[in-house]
Amino acid sequence: MLPLILSADYRAVKVNVIVLICIVIAVNAPLSSQASPTTPTADVQSDVLVISPQPFENSTEPELLDNPRDEDESVSTDHPVKYTGAQLWRISYDDQVRKNAVADLQHKFNVAMWNLNGTSVDMFLKKPVIADARKLLENAKVPFDVVIDDLQHAIDTENPPPEVIEQLQNRKVRNVNFWRRSSAVPVANHRSLSYRRLRGAFLGYNSLDPPMELWPDARWGHRMTWSAYHRLSDIHGYLEYLANTYPEICSVQSIGNSIEGRPLLVLRISNGNAKNKAVWIDGGIHAREWISPATVTYIIDQLVEYREDQPKYVQDIDWYILPVANPDGYEYTHLVDRLWRKNRRPSVNGRCHGVDLNRNFGYHWGEQGASRQPCAETFAGMSAFSEPESLAQKNFFERSGADFQAFLSFHSYGQYILYPWGYDRFVPPDHKELDRLGREAAVLMKKSGGASYSVGPSGSLLYPASGGSDDWGKGTLGIKYCYTIELRDSGRTGFILPANQIISTSKEAQIFAYKVAETITHG
C-alpha cells in the first residue's frame, strides 16, 4: 500500500490514510458491551443446580485466560521456551478486595489465570514479576499459596526419562512382532483374548526382534504405553495400527488438515449395525492439556483391544474419536513451548500466533469469555470457523449420516463435568437430564476410587466462554448429551500432570463415557 500512497496526490493520500486507520481500529476493536455477566433464566431451580453467585457490585472480574504474552515466544523454533523460576499461585478470591487484587495482578504484571476453583484462582507468574506480585498481595492482605514453585522443574519431570519411554515403546513393538511372526500363536488368532494374555506374558521377549528400521510399523505394532505422554506420530501410528489389526470394527479417516498441514484423524469403532447410535469424543483441542489425548487414546484401547470385556451397550455404539484436535499446537508443546494453548495460525498482527480453537465454533461466537485481540490466549479468530481444525469438525458432522446422541470433549484441568450453556449463565430446557447423568457418572467415578468431579453448566459453575465446541454441538447440531470434561487434577500440578496419573485419570473418563453410552442406549 505504501508505494500507492506516495505516488498519489494529496487528496488520495488523505483517503488512504483514513482507510488505513479504520482497518487498524477494526482489527483491534474490543468485544461488545455484551461481555458483562448476566443472570440465569427464571426456570432454573435452586434445588437442581447450584448457580454461581452474582458478581459483587462494581466488581472487577478477571480476564479469564485472556492474557497477552510479553513477546511472541512462538516465532523461533530453535530455542525452546524455558519457565525456570516461574510459579503457580492459588489466590483467595471470595470478596471484592481479593477480586480487585487479582485484576491488578493481571493488568500490572501480565499474570495469566489458569483455573477458577470456587473461592480461589490459580495464577501463573513468570519469575521477573514474582517479587512485585508478592508485595502487591501482601499489601492488600490477600492470602495465597505457592502451588508449584518452579514450573520448569515440573515440566522436566512430568514424563519418564527419554530412555525409559524408548524402552517401553520398543517392548510394545517387539512383543507384537514376535507373536505376529511366531508359529506358536497363529496370526488368525491375534485378536483373541487368549492371544492378548499370552502376548502380555511375554512382554519384552527379544529373541525374534525385528530390525530397528522396521519400528514402528502399523502392520505389526505400536508405541503407545499410557505410562508416558506421546508425540503425535505415536498417536497417529496407533490409530493406523488398530485399523490394520481390527479392520472388522476399526477404520481411520482424515476429516481435514491443520493450518500446518497435519491430518485430523478420526477413528471409527463400530460393529456395523445400522441401528447403532453414535458418540463423538475429541481431545487435545488445547495444546498444553496433554492428559486429554492420553485419556482419549486409553478409552480407545479399552474399546478395541478389550472389546470382549465391554458391556453390550458399549459394543452397540458407533464411536467416532478424534484424539488430537489441535495437532500443530500439540507438537509445538513438545518441541518449543510446553504451555502453548492455541493452534498455530500465523500472526495476524506481526507478533502473535494462534487462535483458541475452543472459542472458534459458530454458536454465539465472539461473545463473553472470548477475545478479539490476537495476543490473547482466548483469541476467537477473525470469524466463526476461521480455522481449518474447527471447520473440519463442522464439515464432518454436516456430511455424516451417523445418529449422534452424545458429544464429549476432554480438557484439563479442574475435575469438572460441564454441560451447556457456556456462552452465558443460562441452561438449556433439558438441563435436568444433563445434570442427572453427570452427577450419576461423578458418583460412579468417585466410588471406583477416582477423584471427585463437580457437575454443572459451564457458564455458571465456572465462567462464561463463548464459541465452545460443546455449545455448538448442543445449539447447532441438536445433540442431546453434550459435555466438556475437565480432567485431573484440582490444581496441585495444573496442566503439568505427571504421567504416572494417566491411567487413573483415564479410568475415570472411561467410566463417564460408558455411563453416557448406557444412558443413550437404555434411557
Image (tube, helix red, strand yellow):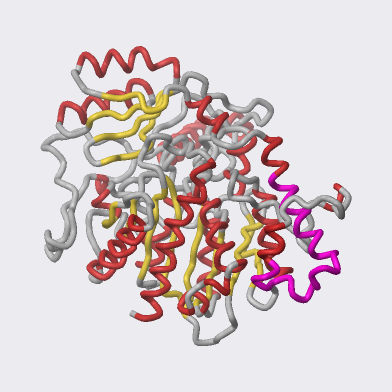
User: Is residue 54 visible from the viewing direction of this image?
Assistant: yes
- Indicate the position of residue 298 as horizontal and vertical percent values: 55, 57
Residue under the image location 14 percent in, 45 percent down: 54
Residue under the image location 22 percent in, 37 percent down: 119
Q: Residue 175: say if magenta.
A: yes
Q: Is residue 213 above or below residue 100?
A: below
Number of marks in the image?
A: 0
Q: Residue 185: say if magenta.
A: yes
Q: Is residue 286 above or below residue 85?
A: below
- Indicate the position of residue 476 as horizontal and vertical percent values: 39, 68
Residue under the image location 56 percent in, 38 percent down: 347
Which quadrant is home to the C terminus? bottom left
User: Is residue 403 visible from the viewing direction of this image?
Assistant: no
Q: Is residue 483 above or below residue 117?
A: below
* Front-most of residues 200 and 289: 200
**What span is in magenta?**
168-195
In-image side of 60 versus 247 (left or right): left
Which quadrant is home to the N terminus? top right
Q: Is residue 103 above or below residue 130?
A: below
In-image side of 293 versus 98 (left or right): right
Name the quadrant containing residue 251: bottom right
Residue under the image location 18 percent in, 53 percent down: 51
Dominant secondary-structure state across the stretch colored magenta: helix
- Indicate the position of residue 131 as horizontal and vertical percent values: 36, 12
- Indicate the position of residue 419 as horizontal and vertical percent values: 32, 60
* Front-most of residues 403 and 384: 403
